[in-house]
Structure formats: structure tokens, C-alpha cells
Amino acid sequence: MIEHFKKKFEEKTDQELRYILDNKNSYQDDAIEAAKSILEWRKQVGIEIVSKPLANEDIPNEFNPVLSNLNPKLFIKAFNKKDLFTSFCIGFLCFAVVRLFKFYQSEPFFQNLSLIYSLSLFPVLLSINHFLYRIDHRRLNNLAGRFLHSTLVFVFYIVFSSVSYYLITGYFIITSGSSNYSDLFVFLVFIFLIEIFISIFQRVYLFVKLHTAFKLKVFLCIFSLAIILGISLIQNNFYKKPIYKRWGELSWSDFKGMGRPFTTFEAGISSKVYLESDSIGKSYKAYSAQNNQQSWKKYENEDSYELLLHEQYHFNITEVFARKMNSYTKDNPDENYSFYKQKLRDLFGEEREMQRQYDNESDHSIKIDKQISWEYKIDSLLQYYDGSNGRIVDSISGASAYFNEKPVLQEDFDSIDNFKYRYFLIHKYEMEMFLVSFKSLELEFSEQKQTINSYYDANELKIVSLEKETISDNTAYYVFAKDKNNDQVYKNLWFFTKNYTYYLAAKYPYKYNMYPAYTKIADNFINSFKLISTENSLH
């Protein structure tokens, strides 16, 4: 190889040969040795080959340090299957590392350093890319060549990501529009800036044999594949046969999977919306199901009710989107499977985003106030997509209020005051919310207050505040009370008409009074009260 370069360099001037020696990083070792040998021979025999001095702007691009760095011809001319294989390997490694990042993205230790991880990923991988180029060509690539080589790595990464998405969802994402082009331009600028940053420092490479570079590339592919397979094995509990449990109440026995290594979380659930058809494929119905082998708990004897409840509401979110899908199929009947599958894919993205918001805002159930807010929101959505507006109407008294789940209805007779009454009641979020209708005679204002005070005295409750309002010629009293031990808080509405007395109550632990979610739920319930006209009366 040295003889090849000697023959090639024999007509070069001394200036050109010294340029090669002064820029060793840009030339192969044999080329450097050939230039050195020719200069020494010329010195021994007293020969000096010079050329007319050129102005800086007349120096050919090949020997102009600035222009040669920006000239891609050197990279393109030397580009071969080795460089293509290098880009393939680094693109695959990038895909594997991004999968690893996504696997741990919800972990606190990753969230706190996610920006650092993301910013360090490409410089590290691109440096490996250039290191392999140095081994293959025994010289460093110039700036333009490095940029083109890095762009090719990015292309391979996009290919791997698209194929992976297709295998999971069954279709490729093809996007267009100015925003996507601008994002691509910004990313290419980012790569170029990384290359400039790398070129600032003197890179030191080990000079190894050509076959060693091939082994290193194969190792990178095997290492990348090991990451991907490792994640897949852990997520699927080494591919044990799963049981798919349709939506319902969960227990810890439904969590059989293997947790993420080094995780800081106590449990995780895997649930998904599925689409099924009738026997002749004419109608389709969505349902949600939990995969027990992909759902896991960190400790075998886990028994936390609060933690299980948090996971239950992850499952409930999936059920929300199953009902949303069924609402869509009802509004769009007689379509084929592909039509509904496309909608299901769109809902999948919406569901993942809601799951992420639920975890982030509740801090995985640590923030009690946010956890309760989400439970109330999810329950309301479940009810909405089940075709119910949540408003319960007493067909006899006309009393109406919003309950975000079906309440218990009871009726009885007050033997002391000779009142018949009916009431609707739910226990939820460590709260009690109930609506009571009393059959009674019209009371004067003084008698109304006396009735209210008697009720609180009899139940050993202390009135903190009482506000009177007139609504549609009827008298209403908003009462805030608590028990004598400060254990429970009561938000009440008393509403008096000619034939009925209505009583709404939201009761919850006093310790939660500081949390806005509880007061908001209580206020929503109290303010939802309405009277609906009815021809019936209590018997």
C-alpha cells in the first residue's frame, strides 16, 4: 500500500507533501509514510520541487483547511458497504437505547435527568460512529463527511422505529406538513452542531486491524438486540401464557408479571382496548382487558389498598376508551374492521396520554388531592360514555341531583316526627353523598331554622356557618358543620317547599378539608340539586 501512495505522490510538490504530514488525522498511515519517505529521499539527493506561491483564496479546496472540512467529496468518494454497515449498527444501537429510555421514562431517577440523558445520547453515539469510520479508513472524516454519515445513522433509526411501530400497531405513520419539515430541519441543525462540537476536540483513536472493527460492529448489534430482547422478556414475564381479565374489580392476585429491574415504583398494570366482532363479522364491540403477566407488583406480599386503587383507576381509564370506542361504533354502524381499527389506533394515543397525565399529576397516588380529583373525573367519564348523564330523579318528590355512580335508594318512616322520607346514597372517595326527601307541611321561617337546629343537635353536630337564600320563591339554607370531635365535615343544603323538605349532604373526614378536591366534589354535588315537576306525591 505504501508503494501505491509513493507512485501517487511522486509528482506532488514539497509543499503538498508537508501538508499531508501536518494533517495526519486526515490521511491513512500508509499515505503519511509515503509522503515522509519521498521528502527524505528528495532531501538526500538534493531535490526540491516547489510551485508558485498561491494566495489563500487560490489554494485548491483539497489543501484549504476550512474548505476541505466542508467538502463532502472525500467522504462520498470513499463511501462503501463498511460505512453503510456502520450506519446500520449505530442506528440500531440508537433505536435500542431509545427503547431503554422509554422503558424507564416514568421512573423518578430518569425523569430528573431525562434532559441530560437525551442530550448526551446523540453525541456519544455519533462519536462511536466516527470512531468506527477511523478504524475502517485509518483516517478521520471531515466535517461535511461526518454530517452526512450521522444523517445516514438518523435515517436508519427512523427506519427501525417505523418498522417497530408497524409491528405493534399494524400500520406506518406517514406525516406531512410544514411543522414536520421544520422539525426535521431543526434536528439536522442539531446534528451539525454536534459535529462542530466534536470537531473542536482532538480525537484520539486506537489503531486496530480491520477485522477488529467488524467484530466491534457485530458486538454493537448483539448488544442492541440484547437490550431489546431483555426489555421484551421482562415486559412479558418470559412469555408465560397470560390471562386477559376483562374490566372489573382488580385484586393483587391479578398481578403476576415481573417488575422492571431497579424500579422505584411498587406496581404497574398493563391494560388495553380490544375489538371483537359477532359470529358473522357484521358488528363490532370494544372491551378493555388486563394482561396479568405484564402487570406486576414489586413485593410478593403486597397488600396496600391505596396502591391497588391507583392501579384500578389505570384500568378504569382503559375502560373509558373502550366505552368511547363503542359509542363511536354505535354512531358509525355497518363499517368494516379496518375502519374501526383506525379509530382504535387514534384512541390508543389519547389513552396513553391520559394514563401519563394521571400518573404525573397524582405523582403515582402520592398526592391525595390530585388522586381524588382523577378518581372523580374518571368515574364521571365512565358514566358519560355509558350513556348516562348521572342525574338521578326521585319520581315521587321530584328531587334531582348528580351522582357519578348509581346510588342506593332507600325509604323509611320517621316515627318521631311522623315523616315519610326517601333517600339516595353513595359511599365514594371516603365520602358520603346523599339526597333525602321528607314529606312535610309548609313551615314558617322560624320553624325552618328550628328544624335545622334540632337536626344538628340531635346528631351532635356543630354548625360553623349558615347562609339563607331564596330560590324560585322557596327558601334554601347552605350549612357547613362538623362533628364535636372534629372528625367529620358536613356540607349541606336544606330546601323547603310547600309539601317537601329536601336535604342534601356531602360528608367527608375533617383531615381532608384542606384538600380542594374534596370541597370541589362536595360543592358539585350540592350545587347539582334541582326540582323536577312530578304529578306524584309520597304515600
Image (cartoon, grey):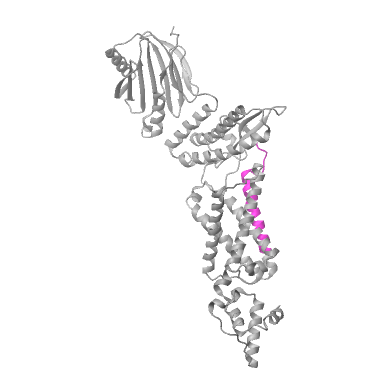
Residue 186 position within the rendered picture, expressed as x and y whole percent measured from the top left: 53, 55
Is residue 315 depicted above or below 416 in this figure?
below
Quarter containing the N terminus: bottom right
In the current view of this chain or complex, which residue is farthest to the right? 280
Q: Residue at x 63, y 93 (%)?
A: 46
Q: What secondary structure characterizes most of the magenta part?
A: helix
Q: Nearer the viewer, residue 229 or 405?
A: 405
Name the image quarter holding residue 97.
bottom right
User: Considering the image in quadrants, where does the C terminus appear?
Assistant: top left
Tell me if residue 108 can be seen.
Answer: yes
> Total of numbered circles in the picture?
0
Residue sitting at 55 percent across and 38 percent down? 350
Magenta span contains residue 333 = no
For this orientation, the residue located farthest to the left is: 446
Q: Which residues are magenta?
A: 215-242
Q: Position of residue 468 (x, y in %)?
A: 30, 20
Question: x, y percentage for residue 292?
Answer: 61, 37
Residue nearest the viewer, comparing 2 with 223: 2
Place residue 330 in its image quadrant: top right
Give above or below for 2 relative to 196. below
Left or right placement of residue 312 versus residue 96 in this view: left
> Residue 234, position in %: x, y?
62, 46
Q: Nearer the viewer, residue 230 or 156?
A: 156
> Is 364 positioned to the left or the right of 229 in the image?
left
**Image position of 63 with respect to 509: above or below:** below
Residue at (64%, 49%) from the top-left corner? Answer: 162
Residue, far top: 539
172 relative to 118, above or below: above
Residue 243 visible in rendering: no
